[in-house]
Image: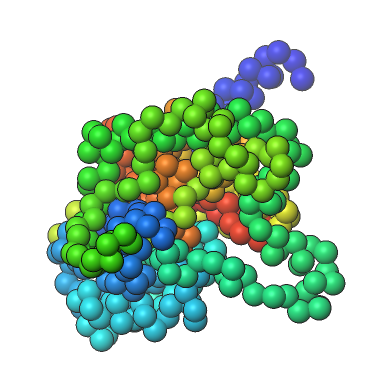
Amino acid sequence: MGALDRLTQISGQISGSKSAREKLFQKSPDDIVVTGCLRTAFTKGGKGGFKDTQAADLMAGALKGLLERSKIDPSLVEDVCVGEVLAPGGGATEMRAAALVAGFPESTAVRTLNRQCSSGLQACVDVANQIRAGMIEVGVGAGVESMSLHYGPGAVTEFSELLESHPEAANCKVPMGVLSEDMARDLKISRADQDAFAASSYQKALKAQQEGLFDQEIHPLTVQYTDPKSGETKTITVNKDDGVRPGITPESLSKIRSAFAEGGSIHAGNASQVSDGAAAVLLMKRSTAERLGQTILGRFVTASIVGVKPLLMGIGPWKAIPKALELAGGLTVDDIDVFEINEAFASQCLWCANELHIPKEKINPKGGAIAFGHPLGCTGARQVSTLLYELKRRGQKVGVTSMCVGTGMGMAAVWVAE
């Protein structure tokens, strides 16, 4: 290929990318839009403000807040889908009850789903696709987790001999911390780089919290809290993430003992926090939103789901994000203004970002799960409000939410703020 041909090809790629981004801003009555989104604060598992609050109560509070903010007639909401990972029975009975407590009538259907760490995003995508298919007009995608009450050794059941005898199947139950340690070693992700990434997450989250940048997305909840020292039960209002800590630096993190291997690189300071929280997203067609006088906050474009080797669970976003960009019309990393990539572990998030050549200033500008927590079923729905409010604040438009998924998967979605 001659120099002129190469220049012509590059020019075509650039103009094609620009065209793909511009197409995202074309509005259609059939667009799937977000007219309300919020989350609760995230609190430390076992000791934070929500340690004594059932997941269903968290979800009821978030759903009630969504109704209050959007002012939607609850009877117009035909389905509520809630992502939840740890609850026995998938929390299906409790979430139906939570929707009724929140103010939805008996005509509003409710279901739960579990796609591990992407459950909240999968719930939003499922509702969007139900609307797109004409099954419903208005729906809510949500996510919740009480890791305080449901997280523990029993979270993974024993495998049968059939599953244990298949090498890749058996790998599905390897603890995430162990496989992340192995991945960091094999992919040569240094502890120093992980600690620098984690410290940056804390610093960004602290700055955002001090500047009130989470206030729009957080819906305060009033709950009962039993003081572990005095045993006194009192009523408290939780309105901010309690895992965000000042004074975190790469140097301070470097002193923390590794958690999964002697001399390893994964530890409590560079992995996501065990936490409790809920989030909810109201979705409908643009034509429906305009007819109902709903304020449009953003638009769902598309989503991807991929599989990877179970022992390489953390690389999920590396494979899912390019697929989502392609499904969105051939977007490139340069077309995206903000990436919300779940920080399950600094090692995996950092590796995915580096491999995809995502500029660090575009990743989790208000910090991430290392700094304020990862309630498993909730995070995917939480990212929607975090992303859309941040895009609007910056005067930017296009964002991606993504996460790695336990047992070896990845998920990503493309959103446009309005």
- Looking at the image, residue 95 lies above or below residue 9: below
> Looking at the image, which residue is at 55% across and 54% down?
411
**Image quarter for residue 237?**
bottom left
> Looking at the image, which residue is at 64% across and 75% down?
157
Colouring scheme applied when the structure was drawn: rainbow
Q: Give the image location of residue 401, x and y in percent.
A: 46, 47
- Looking at the image, residue 212 lies above or below residue 302: above
**Image quarter for residue 189?**
top right
> Looking at the image, which residue is at 50% across and 66% down?
151
Q: Nearer the viewer, residue 176 or 294?
A: 176
* Number of on-image labels: 0
- Looking at the image, residue 333 lies above or below residue 62: above
Q: Give the image location of residue 4, x and y in percent.
A: 67, 14
Q: Is residue 22 visible?
A: no
Q: Give the image location of residue 315, x and y in percent.
A: 65, 46
Does residue 108 appear left or right of residue 4 in this picture?
left
Q: Nearer the viewer, residue 234 or 159?
A: 234
Which residue is outermost to the front? Answer: 230
**Image quarter for residue 148?**
bottom left
> Looking at the image, which residue is at 43% across and 78% down?
91
- Looking at the image, residue 26 lies above or below residue 107: above
Does residue 36 appear left or right of residue 159 in this picture?
left
Location of the C terminus by quadrant is top left
Q: Is residue 41 visible?
A: yes
Q: Give the image location of residue 73, x and y in percent.
A: 16, 72
Which residue is outermost to the top? Answer: 3
Which residue is outermost to the bottom? Answer: 106
Location of the N terminus by quadrant is top right
